Each structure stands twice: as C-alpha cells, then as structure tokens.
Amino acid sequence: NIKDIVAQVNEMDSNSLTYKNVDILSNFLNEQGKILPRRVTNLNSKQQKKITKLIKQARVATLMPFIVGKNCIKWLLAT
C-alpha cells in the first residue's frame, strides 16, 4: 500500500534513505517504470524531489531500469 510506504519514508530521516534502497524506491514507480506524481504519493515537494533524485541516481547506477519492457519483467518480479 502506497500510504504505508509514504509513512515509512516520512519516519526515516533525510540521510538514511539512499539510492541503494531499491525496494523502497521501486514502490514509487508505476507498472511502466514511470515515477508516480505527488498527487498519488501524497509526499510534500521536498520529499518528492528527493525520491525523484534517488530514483534517477539508482537508474544511472543500473540498480533500477530506465524503461520497463519484456526484459525487465524478471527484474520487477525479483524485487
């Protein structure tokens, strides 16, 4: 549930959430691999910017895919 994950992010201090927390960050992506908007996640602006930045860092570090296609389905199921 996205509300439980948002509550978990709110409880974490700003330094404990990193781009390596792929299991948490993957909850902020839809089934197409796009970042969920603020109106869905109910994060404030500062938190949404941080989540977006961390997801982009994880994508560059190849911890998360840029696009979700037939080849990426196995990755999503593994997380």
Image (spheres, grey):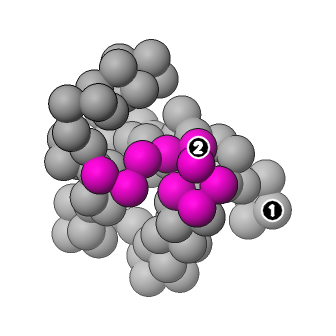
Point out the residue furthest to the right here: 15
Point out the residue furthest to the front here: 71
Towards the viewer: 68 or 39:
68
Span shown in magenta: 59-67
Towards the viewer: 43 or 20:
20
Instruction: Kindly state the secondary structure of the residue where label 1 is placed.
Output: loop
Position in image of residue 25 (x %, y %): 50, 47
Name the residue rendered at 32%, 33% in the picture.
72
Question: Is residue 64 left or right of 70 when viewed as pictured?
Answer: right
**Mark 1 vs mark 2, CA separation in Å:** 19 Å
Position in image of residue 7 (x %, y %): 49, 47
Name the residue rendered at 38%, 56% in the picture.
66
Position in image of residue 34 (x %, y %): 26, 58
Instruction: Kindly state the secondary structure of the residue where label 2 is placed.
Output: loop
Neighbour tally class for label 2: few under 14, some 14-19, many 20 plus, Cα within 10 Å: some
* Labels 1, 2: front one: 2
Q: Quadrant of residue 76?
A: top left
Q: Amino acid at mark 1?
A: Asn
Q: Which mark is residue 32?
A: none
Name the residue rendered at 25%, 68% in the picture.
37
For residue 12, above or below residue 70 = below
Point out the residue furthest to the bottom here: 45
Q: Amino acid at mark 2?
A: Leu
Q: Which mark is residue 63?
A: 2
Q: Is residue 65 magenta?
A: yes
For residue 60, above or below residue 71 = below
Residue 38 visible, this angle: yes
Residue denoted by label 1: 15
Position in image of residue 46 (x %, y %): 53, 81
Q: Is residue 53 magenta?
A: no
